[in-house]
Image (cartoon, rainbow, N blue to C red):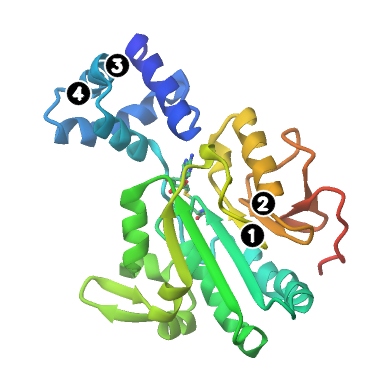
């Protein structure tokens, strides 16, 4: 699949979401958009791309952007960030915030909610150390359908077993006819809201901890730099940023630094935190 309709579509997807689609990824466009083309009664993906170029139907464009995004997620993905959060990030933050007794966490590109609910479990499991604190977990994604699933907080057997220990499953989920529903305690902690990372962070306030994992990997360097620098400005000096295990700031920005010896944990540049174990 090549030609002006395909090129137009690639530009559109990059503008709307940051996702880089190149001609080598034509197979991905074909496989992701085929079901959508069928459901729209179109002969094939080529017809869908031609319609988009010809008449720019907004609702259809939005469905294409959603279809092109990868929504893969699971509870406690990669384990280490959540272990770091509990063992090395939260304790000094709690110490430093004894007066204000509040913490704000942002899960950017949260997909179907497993990441923010994992964060909420960790916060709850801190027990008396955070009792009576104002805890806010803001979870955002550009895709409204995936946010709807996240808000419902219902996961099937496969999803609930992916990353969750039996103890956590028993403690934080209850069986419902369609699977397992996350407890109301966790649901009340997490606020889901639509947000496109390309729109920046103006008006969102400051976040002590930010998770932005497994999304920048799909973007070009310029978008990565812009987003990482905005994220850096949205964190206080002791703020913590978690990126995905395949993501890096190297060659992208000097505003954010990795934490030596701790994969996935980043800080604002020039601020030296006590070394994590
Ligand atoms: C692979 S999932 C990552 C989910 C979770 N962070 C994790 O690591 O398990 C990527 C998510 O990024 C979202 N996304 C892609 N581009 C985005 C953008 N420009 N703004 C906000 N969300 C975006 C997609 O809708 C998708 O749900």
Disc 4 designates what residue? 44
Task: Measure how far apart labels 3 and 1 are at the Cα level.
Answer: 39 Å
The residue to which callout 2 is attached is 234
Is residue 116 toward the left or the right of residue 154 in the image?
Answer: right
Q: Nearer the viewer, residue 261 or 216?
A: 216
Say if disc 4 is inside 8 Å of ligand 1: no
Which mark is in front, 3 or 1? 1
Q: Earlier in the sequence, mark 1 or mark 4?
A: 4
Name of the residue lying farthest toward the bottom: 128
Relative depth, front residue between 104 and 13: 104
Q: Is mark 3 within 8 Å of ligand 1?
A: no
Dot 4 or dot 2: first in sequence order is 4
**Does residue 169 appear anywhere in the picture?**
yes
From the top left corner, tell me how far across and down residue 208 is, in percent: 67, 63
Q: Are marks 1 and 2 in contact (CB under 8 Å)?
A: yes
Mark 1 to mark 4: distance in Å? 44 Å
Mark 1 highlights which residue?
A: 207
Mark toward the viewer: 3 or 4: 3
């Amino acid at each position: 699949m090549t030609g002006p309709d395909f090129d137009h579509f690639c530009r559109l997807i990059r503008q709307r979401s940051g996702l880089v689609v190149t001609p080598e990824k034509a197979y991905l466009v074909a496989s992701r958009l085929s079901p959508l083309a069928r459901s729209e009664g179109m002969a094939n993906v080529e017809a869908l791309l031609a319609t988009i170029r010809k008449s720019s139907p907004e609702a259809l464009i939005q469905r294409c952007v959603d279809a092109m995004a990868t929504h893969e997620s699971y509870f406690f993905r990669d384990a280490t960030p959540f272990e770091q959060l509990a063992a090395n990030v939260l304790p000094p933050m709690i110490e430093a915030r004894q007066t204000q007794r509040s913490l704000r966490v942002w899960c950017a590109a949260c997909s179907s909610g497993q990441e923010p609910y994992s964060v909420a479990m960790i916060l709850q499991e801190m027990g008396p150390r955070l009792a009576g604190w104002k805890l806010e977990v803001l979870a955002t994604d550009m895709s409204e359908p995936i946010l709807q699933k996240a808000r419902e907080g219902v996961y099937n057997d496969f999803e609930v077993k992916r990353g969750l220990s039996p103890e956590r499953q028993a403690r934080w989920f209850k069986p419902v006819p369609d699977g397992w529903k996350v407890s109301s305690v966790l649901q009340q902690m997490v606020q889901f809201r639509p947000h496109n990372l390309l729109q920046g962070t103006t008006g969102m306030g400051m976040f002590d901890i930010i998770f932005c994992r497994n999304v920048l990997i799909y973007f070009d360097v310029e978008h990565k730099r812009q987003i990482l620098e905005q994220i850096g400005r949205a964190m206080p000096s002791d703020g913590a940023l978690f990126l995905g295990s395949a993501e890096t700031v190297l060659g992208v920005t000097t505003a954010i630094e990795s934490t030596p010896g701790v994969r996935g944990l980043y800080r604002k540049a020039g601020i030296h935190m006590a070394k994590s174990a």
